[in-house]
């Protein structure tokens, strides 16, 4: 039996993608606060009731890429046959080198909007925590680190990625590859990453 989604599911997915694309385009063009749900539904030629079947709020639409990023990171880490703590750090850096390059415009929009909204800034912090959890879960799954240790190592990895990526995301320079190479180098010099599984 095929696992491919049926016609109904494909139509629902296309409509969700349309709402997301239209909403993000309007946020970029008009501003987040100036864009109403009605603006989005008018542009997408659907009812507001339809909108709320897919998204509870504008915030949820704005950050609809986050669950995809979590799933993609998890899949990328699980796809490696053999990983140590250090090579998991490398795999995370590799993932974000590609992912941020592909999603930079969307991520920059989210950062710009969140700058003016305290609640949305809190959402971005929660997203960072979610990414840490994905990495920590993989460390625990492979028995490379115990619970608290896994969380601490994953936090260090994601801090390195975030801090090195932010200048490029905000200012467009230095280039992303250079920044991610620096993140990798700093993580390789971090003793606890090498010592974690030896303890």
Image: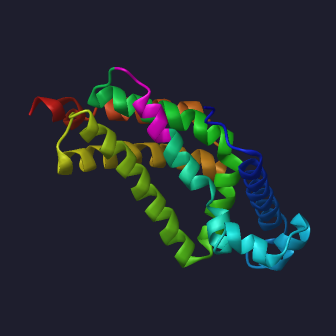
Q: Residue at x 63, y 74 (%)?
A: 56
Q: Position of residue 96 (x, y in %)?
A: 53, 38
- Asked whether residue 4 appears in the rendered view, the answer is yes
Residue 45: where, in percent of width, then height? 91, 67
Q: Is residue 78 magenta?
A: yes
Q: Residue 152, how many percent across, how many down?
A: 25, 49
Q: How is the image coloured?
A: rainbow
199 relative position to 43: left or right? left
Count the labels in the image: 0
Q: Quick check: is 72 in the magenta stretch?
A: no
In front: 90, or 135? 135
Residue at 27% in and 43% down: 153
Q: Is residue 149 left or right of residue 99?
A: left
Quadrant of the image occupied by residue 30: bottom right
Q: Please say if 197 is above or below 120.
A: above
- Image quarter where the C terminus lies is top left
Please name the predominant secondary structure of the magenta segment in the image.
Answer: helix
Left or right of residue 142, residue 20 in this image: right
Residue 36 visible in the current orientation: no
Please tell me whether residue 119 is drawn above or below residue 79 in the rendered image.
Answer: below
Q: Position of residue 86 (x, y in %)?
A: 30, 28
Q: Which residues are magenta?
A: 73-81
Which of 160 and 121 lies nearest the eye of the viewer? 121
Question: Residue placed at 75% from the left, 47% from the top?
Answer: 10
- Of all residues shown, which one is farthest toward the front? 1
Q: Residue furthest top?
A: 82
Q: Is residue 122 above or below residue 170?
A: below
Q: Is residue 31 above or below residue 102?
A: below
């Amino acid at each position: 039996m095929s696992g491919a989604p049926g016609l109904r599911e494909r139509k629902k997915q296309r409509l969700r993608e349309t709402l997301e694309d239209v909403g993000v385009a309007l946020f970029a063009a008009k501003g987040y606060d100036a864009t109403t749900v009605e603006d989005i539904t008018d542009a997408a030629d659907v009812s507001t009731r339809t909108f709320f079947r897919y998204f509870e709020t504008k915030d949820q639409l704005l950050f609809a890429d986050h669950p995809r990023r979590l799933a993609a990171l998890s899949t990328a880490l699980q796809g490696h046959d053999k990983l140590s703590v250090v090579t998991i750090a490398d795999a995370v850096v590799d993932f974000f080198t590609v992912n941020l390059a592909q999603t930079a415009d969307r991520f920059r929009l989210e950062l710009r909007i969140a700058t003016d909204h305290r609640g949305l800034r809190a959402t971005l912090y929660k997203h960072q925590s979610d990414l840490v959890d994905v990495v920590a879960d993989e460390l625990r799954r492979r028995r490379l680190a115990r619970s608290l240790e896994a969380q601490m190592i994953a936090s260090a990895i994601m801090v390195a990625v975030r801090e090195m990526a932010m200048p490029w995301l905000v200012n467009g320079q230095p280039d992303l590859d250079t920044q991610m190479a620096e993140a990798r180098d700093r993580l390789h010099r971090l003793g606890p990453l090498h010592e974690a599984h030896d303890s």
